[in-house]
Amino acid sequence: MIRGRVIKYGDDVDTDVIIPARYLKHGADPQVLKEHAMEDLDPEFGSKVRERTIIVAGRNFGCGSSREQAPLALKYAGVRAILAESFARIFFRNAINVGLPVMEVPGISEAVEDGDEVEVDLERGLVRVLGRGGERVLRGTRIPEFLMEILEAGGLVPYLRRRFHAEDSPDTG
Amino acid sequence: MRTAIEKILSRASGRDATVGEIVEAEIDVYMTHDPMGALVEDALDGMGAGVRHPERVVAIQDHFVPAKDIESAILSMRLREFHRRFGFGAYYEVGRGGICHVVMPEEGHVVPGDVVVGTDSHTPTSGALGAFAVGIGATEMAAAMALGKLWFKVPPTILIRGEGAFPPLVHAKDFILKVISAIGTDGAVYKVLEFDGPAIRGLEMDERFVLTNMSVEAGAKTGFISPDGVTLSYLEKRSSRPPRPAYSDRGSFEDELTFDAASLEPLVAAPHSPANVRAASEVDEEIDQAFIGSCTGGRLSDLRAAVRVLRGRRVSEGVRLIVIPGSRRVYREALRMGLIEALVESGAAIGPPSCGPCLGAHLGVLGPGEVGISSSNRNFRGRMGHPESRVYLASPSTVAASAVTGRVTDPREVVG
């Protein structure tokens, strides 16, 4: 169960505003990514984001570039999950691969206000909204099981490390 | 009834791949470049894995080259070292390759029927050769390199038919902008756009690559054009690998949309979305910079089109025109044909083959409040520089005409 406070955005949040290309020369430096996440879209993001932030957005979140620095920047900034009407496909896969939970939740952008508290049950694909207008539950698209395993491992790198070196870590078999 | 993509993924996964299924497909070609190579190598090291088929990997220096500062020099070094460590099948040093999406087809790295992955979202460019080519992230690339295969959800295909023939000064760029404006930036998410019809068959390869490249601006997983005589004669002398052409069966498409190329006019995508499309003639805005280059505007046909507009004319006093040939081959051919001389004569600044200012990194970054018109593929906020700059996307003819007049201009007004 992931719980957090909502920062809400609209449709077509692209990777160039999530982390502008001018910072890509720094590779995947966590400090740089964290500092500049979302700065071209929302200069206040850095001060709004807290350890328990959940981003809620409209359609086509993460469209544009294949840069993995986009989900990494949000993860390093303290975002715990992203719920959107829909995602651009490369961003969706990149987010899972770096261990940042993402889920498609139809109707989420209407049901949730900036600052609402939400609780995400990835296993069951449910989102509980604890908003000003009372509590309600939305149904999202459940993440396929093999992707849940990647998320649970903390991303594709630790997941495959375990697979390639199963003999090194007997208790994860 | 199966789509070409279902057939390619069936061959690559060794099972009957139908739309909606998740399959593991063997990868024929892997592409990575300077901004992502270091991340891929770090992920591989994190996994404790090696590269299963280094001979299938193509590494290309293209984004921040020649190195613009110390950080980008380090990324460049990392890609070079990554190649030396594993001995990739091909490596393109600064000055000897160019933009990955121009180089990959041009140097014969892709043939029809291939499954291609690249750490760049415009990897679908190679789909114009009848391949299944998709963009992926760095960690995903590491996994694919380690395993030799990657999972894909088999996507449905939307057929985009182009009727008629393109009028003079109207390009593939105008066609794809029309398509994106019609279906939206998420109109093809998780789907394939397949292009066919007389208008498409009448295009040379240089122009076809623009269609598959920009399919991703409509959210598509990839773009695809089945091979024909134009494809096969392009591949001749470039690749020795045998093609495995795949064709979609009639009735296998999820949807079919028809666009009339004959009635198209020069278009632009206004700031800040490739779907924000209008006629070039309807836009009244002065520009500061014009850019002809990138993986959708730096091929030989683009430079030829630009020179057709610019020859005997001069770039407007208040405008910088930046031209960057997409590859060494394009550059050399353009020199041989006298195109570079004509461009310099008109007042253009020529840059070395690279991505240049397309992604706002160097060689022509826009300042606060500046307006650019560009033959590239993205105009998101801040894409080409300062977040307060604004970018119009257009064909090379429209960019060249705008450079002459100093404002967004329909090239038919200049060439007449």
Image (cartoon, rainbow, N blue to C red):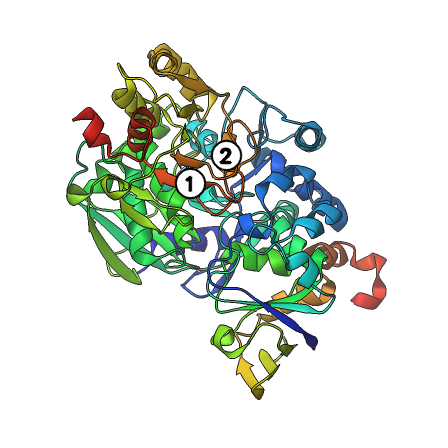
Dot 2: element: loop
Residue B381 in the image: state x and y as whole percent: 49, 47
Residue B49 visible, this angle: no
| Left/right of residue B304 with respect to residue A44 in the rendered view | left
| Nearer-N-terminus badge (1/2) | 2
Q: Quadrant of the C terminus of chain B?
A: top left
| Left/right of residue B387 with respect to residue B341 in the rendered view | right
Amino acid marked by disc 1: Val
Q: Which residue is drawn at 62% across and 77% down?
A: A116
Q: For marks 1 and 2, give the CA distance.
A: 9 Å
Quadrant assignment, res A125: bottom right
Q: Label 2: chain?
A: B
Label 2 Cα neighbours within 10 Å, binned few <14 / some 14-19 / many ≥20: many
Label 1 Cα neighbours within 10 Å, binned few <14 / some 14-19 / many ≥20: many
Mark 1 touches mark 2? (CB < 8 Å): yes
Q: Nearer the viewer, residue B269 or B206?
A: B269
Q: Nearer the viewer, residue A129 or B232?
A: A129
Q: Which mark identifies residue B391?
A: 1
Q: Which residue is drawn at 65% across and 37% down?
A: A25
Quadrant assignment, res B44: top right
Dot 1: element: strand
Residue of label 2: B366
Amino acid marked by disc 2: Leu
Residue B196 in the image: state x and y as whole percent: 25, 47
Residue B185 in the image: state x and y as whole percent: 39, 55
Is B190 placed above or below B217 here?
below
Residue B154 visible, this angle: yes
Q: How many labels does the image show?
A: 2
Q: Quadrant of the N terminus of chain B?
A: bottom left
Q: Nearer the viewer, residue B298 or B416?
A: B416
Q: Label 1: chain?
A: B
